[in-house]
Image (cartoon, rainbow, N blue to C red):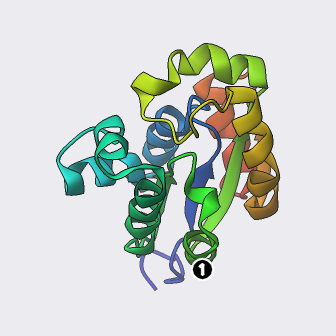
Amino acid sequence: MRDGQDMQPKRSIALIGMAGAGKSTVGKLLAQELQYAFVDTDDRIREINGTSLKGIIDQVGLAAFKQKEAEAVLTLQADATVIATGGSVVYSAEAMRHLQTFATIVWLKLSHETIKARIGNPAERGLVVQPGQTIDALFNEREPLYAKYADATIDAEALSPAQIAAAIRQAVNHA
């Protein structure tokens, strides 16, 4: 025991949701509040590959990009960490099972309209979207996967980043 605290490892928190849901913004704030480390898996992918997400998708295609995203998650062994995942990580059951072994998974849920407004031009963002696929179709495709893997769902529609972080703390009993 140290300072009266038990030595049980702290459980990490993984944020999932569409691009534009605020995973990175909220994740940084939440990590600071909890005094946890912060990892953005999109940043890890960019660092490993030396280019933007769009650049990676352009170079290797969507399927290979999704594999790189899964690999970035599979390398994580994090304790007391807030993890902002890429929006398409839910396509990898293996990556999601790995996250479940050490993290509480929280879905930041927003409406189609809010996501579309925040994303802007999906081609510039490096969004994993099939040619001709609309944001609505992508959202509808991913929504059941987010719901499947989420331990907690935060309706982030009308909340500030600080309010979302507070809701996450409450949902995962870190209030």
Rendered residue at 38%/62% (across/down): 68
- Along the line of sight, the residue nearer the viewer: 2 or 24: 24
Q: Check disc 1 and report its element: helix, strand or loop.
A: loop
Q: Is residue 142 left or right of residue 59?
A: right
Three-letter amino acid code at the position of disc 1: Thr
Residue 44, given in percent of the width and then of the height, sits at 30, 54
Asked if 39 appears above or below 166 in the picture, the reply is below
Q: Quadrant of residue 157?
A: top right
Asked if 117 appears above or below 39 in the picture, the reply is above
Q: Read off the residue under disc 1.
A: 101
Rendered residue at 72%/58% (across/down): 173
Mark 1 closeness class: few <14, some 14–19, many ≥20 residues within 10 Å: few
Q: Is residue 155 visible?
A: no
Residue 17, given in percent of the width and then of the height, sits at 65, 43
Residue 32, given in percent of the width and then of the height, sits at 43, 43
Asked if 108 appears above or below 82 in the picture, the reply is above
Residue 98, given in percent of the width and then of the height, sits at 56, 77
